């Protein structure tokens, strides 16, 4: 079997409500789906969210990058995913979102061709159910408290509060109020690089003892010294997200005592294989792991993240799926979640069926230049 076509399809999906975080407000989910078809007529799907402030990639740049990478992938055996990744890296530096979209589609296609679920292509399955991390991202105290109460009664056991939006004092007061409701459960805060070191220090001092378990990306991604200073000042575990774009980044954070855990995303690392490898590295280093989709990714990227979450050694900081925040998904049957948990998908490939009518409805035209 050979790869016949690789098509990037930009879509803009409606969100149920905007997600507000430091430096970014997500009102629409602008993602690129990658559709790969084999010469036998089998189709595999991948997805990558545009994430200008996280990966530097926009809808337009992802579509262009997929076109640019097309010639290295077309004609290959889809099952040789390591070969395709090496060929893509040889032709183009970076662009991890575009590469992840293609890599996920190759996993889906290979899984379908061999009647194998994607998790079995990634390694031995270690769990059949994963706890989901519920994001509380409204930014106003009353709304967030209601949201926390509702998600706790729905069965969620892991939570993330978006901070770095208000002053450290106000964010800390909101955090403490939410922690009271969620007492004893896994609670995290995420500043999305929104604090200076001084502000992050003020925040951690004000939330010490509140029950907050970990605090993600308090300062800018490249400010390792700032991360280390915050980590040294608190018992709360510090996590890195925007600062992690490779396995080396994980090792650096560990060496500098800048983080005790990381958030892993396919679009940052270049695919789900790299997510699994990063998960194995974290196990060796004794670091905690959260696997996450970018806000607004559909059931395609969410299924891919779930497969990786089923095989990595530890997922102490839970799995963040984002398709539930969409007003409309690209699959008729979204990845199903219940009681704050998600079960492994054991059908061939990703285990979700893309509805091409939905894709057409949400497609946005991107002008591209053909690359020879
Ligand atoms: Mg984050």
Image (cartoon, grey):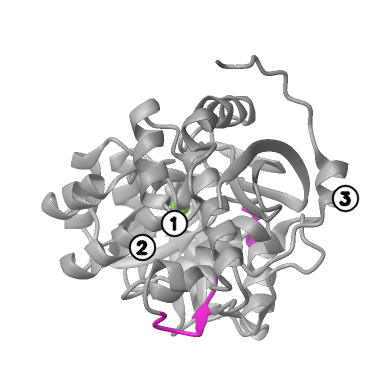
Mark 3 / mark 2, whichever is N-terminal: 2
133 within the magenta span:
yes
Magenta segment: does it hold 63? no
**Tag 1: Cα neighbours inside 10 Å, few (<14), some, or many (≥20)?**
many
Question: How far is mark 3 from mark 2, CA to CA?
Answer: 32 Å
- Residue 319 lies, in percent from the top left, at 49, 68
Instruction: Reply above or below: 136 against 211.
Output: above
Q: Which residues are magenta?
A: 125-141
- Residue at mark 3: 357
- On screen, residue 102 versus residue 256, left or right, reads right
Numbered label attached to residue 324: none
- Who's the residue at 54% across and 56% down the image? 293
Residue at coordinates 20% horizontally, 50% vertically from top-left?
253
Q: Does residue 136 appear to the left or right of 172 in the view shown?
A: right
Q: Residue at x 60, y 80 (%)?
A: 340
Count of numbered circles in the view:
3
Residue under numbered circle 1: 272
Location of residue 232 (image quadrant):
bottom left
The answer to whether the residue labelled 3 contacts the one labelled 1, judged by CB atoms less than 8 Å apart, is no
* Residue identified by numbered label 2: 276
- Are the residues tagged 1 and 2 within 8 Å (C-beta)? yes
Task: Please report the residue visible at 76 percent of the width from the left and 52 percent of the height from the top.
Answer: 17
- Of mark 3 and mark 1, the one earlier in the sequence is 1
**Image-quadrant location for residue 342:** bottom right
Residue extending farthest to the left is 255
């Amino acid at each position: 079997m050979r790869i016949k076509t690789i098509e990037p399809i930009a879509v803009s999906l409606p969100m149920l409500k905007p997600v507000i975080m430091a430096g970014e407000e997500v009102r629409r989910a602008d993602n690129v789906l990658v559709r790969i078809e084999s010469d036998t007529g089998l189709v595999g799907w991948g997805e990558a969210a545009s994430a200008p402030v996280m990966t530097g990639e926009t809808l337009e740049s992802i579509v262009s990058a997929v076109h640019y990478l097309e010639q290295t992938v077309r004609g290959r055996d889809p099952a040789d995913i390591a070969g395709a990744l090496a060929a893509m890296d040889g032709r183009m530096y970076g662009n991890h979102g575009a590469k992840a979209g293609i890599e996920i589609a190759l996993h889906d296609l290979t899984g379908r061709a061999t009647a194998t679920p994607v998790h079995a292509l990634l390694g031995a399955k270690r769990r059949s159910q994963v706890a989901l991390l519920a994001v509380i991202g409204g930014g106003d105290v009353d709304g967030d408290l209601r949201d926390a109460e509702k998600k706790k009664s729905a069965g969620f056991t892991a939570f993330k509060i978006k901070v770095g939006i208000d002053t450290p004092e106000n964010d800390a007061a909101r955090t403490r109020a939410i922690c009271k409701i969620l007492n004893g459960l896994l609670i995290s805060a995420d500043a999305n690089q929104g604090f200076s070191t001084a502000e992050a220090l003020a925040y951690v001092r004000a939330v010490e003892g509140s029950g907050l378990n970990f605090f993600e990306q308090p300062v800018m991604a490249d400010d390792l010294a700032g991360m280390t200073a915050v980590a040294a000042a608190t018992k709360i575990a510090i996590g890195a997200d925007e600062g992690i774009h490779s396995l080396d980044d994980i090792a650096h954070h560990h060496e500098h005592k800048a983080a005790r855990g990381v958030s892993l995303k396919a679009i940052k690392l270049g695919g789900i294989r790299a997510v699994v490898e990063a998960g194995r590295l974290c196990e060796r280093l004794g670091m905690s792991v959260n696997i996450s989709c970018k806000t607004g990714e559909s059931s395609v990227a969410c299924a891919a993240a779930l497969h990786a979450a089923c095989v990595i050694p530890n997922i102490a900081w839970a799995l963040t799926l984002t398709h539930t925040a969409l007003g409309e998904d690209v699959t008729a049957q979204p990845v199903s979640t219940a009681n704050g948990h998600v079960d492994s998908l054991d059908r061939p490939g990703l285990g979700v069926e893309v509805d091409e009518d939905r894709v057409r409805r949400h497609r946005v035209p991107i002008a591209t230049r053909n690359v020879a």
